[in-house]
Amino acid sequence: MSSPTPLWRIVAAREVSTTLRSKGFQFSVASLLLSLVALVVISSLLGGRAQTQDVAVVDDVAVTAVEDGSWIAEDLTGNLTLELTRYADVAAAEQAVTDGEVDAALLPVAGGYEVVGDDAVDDPVGQALTTAMSGLVTTRNAAEQGVDLAALAAGTQVQQRLLDPDAEDAGLRQVASFVFVLLFYVTALTFGMIIAGSVTQEKESRVVEILAAAVPIRALLWGKIAGATLLAVGQTLLLATVGVAALLVTANADALGVIGPAIAWYVVFFVIGFVALASLWSVAGSLASRQQDLQATTAPLQLILFAPYIITLTAGEGVKEVVSMLPIVSTMLMPSRLAEGDVPLWQLLVAIVATVLAAVVLVRVGARVYERTLLQTGRKIGFREALSSTRGQRAEPMSTR
Amino acid sequence: MTRVFGDQTAVDHVSFVVRPGRITGFVGANGAGKTTTMQMLMGVLAPSSGEVRWQGAAVGAVDRRSFGYMPEERGLYPRMKVAEQLAFFARLHGFSAGDARNRATELLEFFDLGERSEDLLDQLSLGNQQRVQIAAALVHRPSALVLDEPFSGLDPLAVDVMVELLHTEAADVPVLFSSHQLDLVERLCDDLIVLAHGRVVAAGPVHELREGGTEQYRVELDGEDASWLRDVRGLVVEAVDGSVALLALDGLTPADLARTLTAHGPVVEMARVRQPLSQIFREITR
C-alpha cells in the first residue's frame, strides 16, 4: 500500500494540473506569448524594413547621380534605396512631386542642381543626392581642368572608429532590460496570486481539514511552492524560447549575442527569487478566509514586487547598483542591469547568496506562520497577529466546538 | 485529553476506548465537545494535555495517515473532477496512481455515481456531494474511521446505503461517529459514549446502557384489571393502567413472574422494558 512518491510531489502534481487546465491561466499565457512575439516582430519591422524613395529626373547627369545616390543612401541607413523616374521637363517633374507620384526631384538650375520636395525632403534622401551629385560634378570638373583628383583628395579621408561598439545596441538593450523587469513582475505576481488563491480556496472550501488530517501541513506548503515554481519557470522558459525563436526568425540573430547571457541569468535569478517569495504568498493565502480577503492580505507582497519595478524605471546608476544586490529585488534588477551592460561577477554572487539566504529564512518563517493560520477559518487574520500567535500550538478550532 | 480555549475548557479529561469491529456512537448536546475531541483524535487540533493512543502506544503521524476522517465542516475541491479528486486523496494516503484510480472507480460505482466520475464536484447535487465526501473518508481503506455527523443532511434511503457501506468497508476497524439522530445511533451502534459539558457522562455497550438500572417489565393481561399484582411478593408495581402494569422485579426471577401471571389468567404480553436512547440521553445529560 505504501508508495515511494513523496507527498509534496502529489500535492505539486495536483497544483500543476489544476492550473494548466484553468481557462484563465491558458488565456494569460497565450496573451503573454502573443505580446512577446508582437514586440519582436514590430520592432524588427520598424527597424529593418526596406524602404524605397522615388526621385524624378529630367537629364542624364541626374540619372547617374540618383544611381550613385541610391548606394550612398543604403550605406547611410542600411535599408533605403532610391528609384528614378524620368520626366520630359522640369514642370512635369515638379507636377509629379506635387501629385505625390515621386518623393523628390533632382532638377537642373542655374549654376547647379536642386533637390525639390513637396513640403519636406527626407534627410537621408537629400544628403545622398547632394553627395552623389557633388562627387559626380567634381569628377567631371577635375577631368575638364586636368586636375589629378586622387592627388587633390589625398589626406582628406575621415574614418570612424568606435571605442564601445556594443553601445550600438543601446536601444535593444534598453528594451530587453525593461522586458526582464516587466516579465518578472508579471510572472511573480501571476503565480504568487495562484499560490495564495489556491491556499485560500482550500480554506474556503474547508477541504483543508481533510488535507491537514492526511498529510503534514509542511508537505502541503512544499507541494504548493514546488508546483507554482515549476509552472512559473516553465512559463519563463517557454517565453524565453519563443522570444529567442522570434529573434532568429526575424533575422535579429545578432541581438542574441547581446541579451543571450542576460536571459540565462534571468532564469537563475527567477528561480531563487520566486522560491523566496513563494512561502510568503502561501502565508498571504492562509491569512485570508475568503477570496475577497486576498486583495488585502497580498497587498504587502504586491508592494515588495512593485518597489523594484519603480526603482528600475527611475533610480540612478549608483542606487541601482547597490539595490540590485538586495535579496528578491535583485531578481528584477540584476538581469535588467546585465541586459544594459556588464555587471561585475562579485556583485552577481552577492545577489545570489543574499537571495538564497533570504529564501531559507522566509520559507522557515513562512512555514511556521502557515501551520498556525491554515486551520483558522471564518475570518481574516493580520500579519502581526499571525507572527505573534502562541508557539507550538497547532491551531484554534475551525468552528463551534 | 483536555483542551482549553482561553479560559474555557471545551474538553475536560475525556477518556474512552473505541474497539475494532465495533461501531461506537458519540453523542452529546451542541457544544458538548464532540467535534473538538474528534479534531484532536485526527491531529488537526493539539490537545492541551493528554494523548491519543493507537494499539497501545501513542499515535504517530504514520498511524494517523491510515485513519479515515469526515470533518463536521464538509469540504472537497469544488472545481475538481470527482474521480480524480478521490484518487488524489487515495494517493495522499499512500496508494499508487493505478490503485488510487481503481479504488475511486469502485467507490463511485457503489454509490451509482460511475457515470458522474468526470463531472466537477460542484456539478453534483448536495446529496451526491455528501456521498463523495464519505467516499473520500473511505478511499484508502482506513484502519480507523472518525466521522463527525456523517448522516446529517441525508435522506433515509441514502442513510441505508451509507450504513451498508460502513458494514462492508469498515467491518473490522474501529469506527467512531457522532450524531444527533439518536434513533440512528440506536440502530447502528454497538457502543455508546455520551458527552456533556466536555466530560464523558456515560460509556459502554448500547444494550447495557439501555437495560441499566433495575429490571423493568411491562405486563398486559387479557382484559383483567392488573391491580392484583400489587399483592404479589418479590416485585414492585410502579404503575397500573387498566390491564397494563409496569413492574420492577425485587426477588422474583423473570421465569417466576411468567408462571405467576399464567397461573392467574390469560396474558397478552410480558416484555422487558428497554429505554429508548433519547430517554437515557435526557436523563444523563440533564
Image (cartoon, coloured by chain):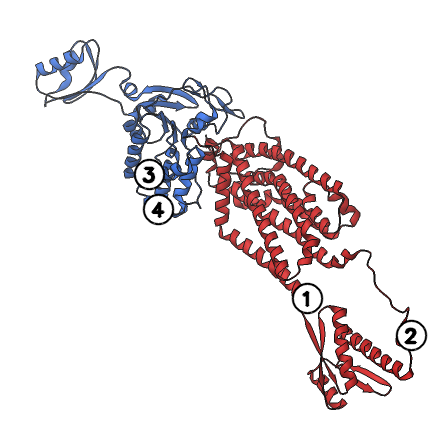
Q: CA distance from mark 3 to mark 2?
A: 100 Å
Task: Please name the residue shown 66% across and 63% down the image.
Answer: A44
Q: What's the CA distance linking mark 4 and mark 1?
A: 57 Å
N-term-proximal mark, 2 vs 1: 1
Badge 1, how many Cα within 10 Å: few under 14, some, many 20+?
A: some
Same chain shared by disc 4 and disc 1: no
State the mark number for residue A48. Answer: 1
Identify the residue position indicated by label 4 in the image: B116
Mark 2 lies on residue:
A152
The disc labelled 4 sits on which kind of residue?
A: Arg
Say what amino acid the circle numbered 1 marks: Gly
Q: Determine if marks 3 and 4 fall on one subunit.
A: yes
Please state the chain letter of the residue tagged with numbered disc 3 in the rendered image. Answer: B
Residue behind mark 3: B106
Disc 2 crowd, CA 10 A, few/some/many (<14, 14-19, 20+): few
Residue drawn where x is 48% and y is 49% of the image = A21
- Report if the CB atoms under discs 3 and 4 are less than 8 Å apart: no
Three-letter amino acid code of the residue under disc 2: Leu
Q: Nearer the viewer, mark 3 or mark 2?
A: 2
Q: Identify the hue of chain B.
A: blue
Single out the mark in the foreground, 4 or 2. 2
In the figure, the shade used to draw chain A is red
Q: CA distance from mark 3 to mark 4?
A: 13 Å
User: Is residue B261 something that shows in the picture?
Assistant: yes
Q: Is residue B169 above or below residue A200?
A: above
Question: From what the image shows, is residue B231 above or below residue B69?
Answer: above
Q: Quadrant of residue B126?
A: top left
Q: Secondary structure at mark 2?
A: helix
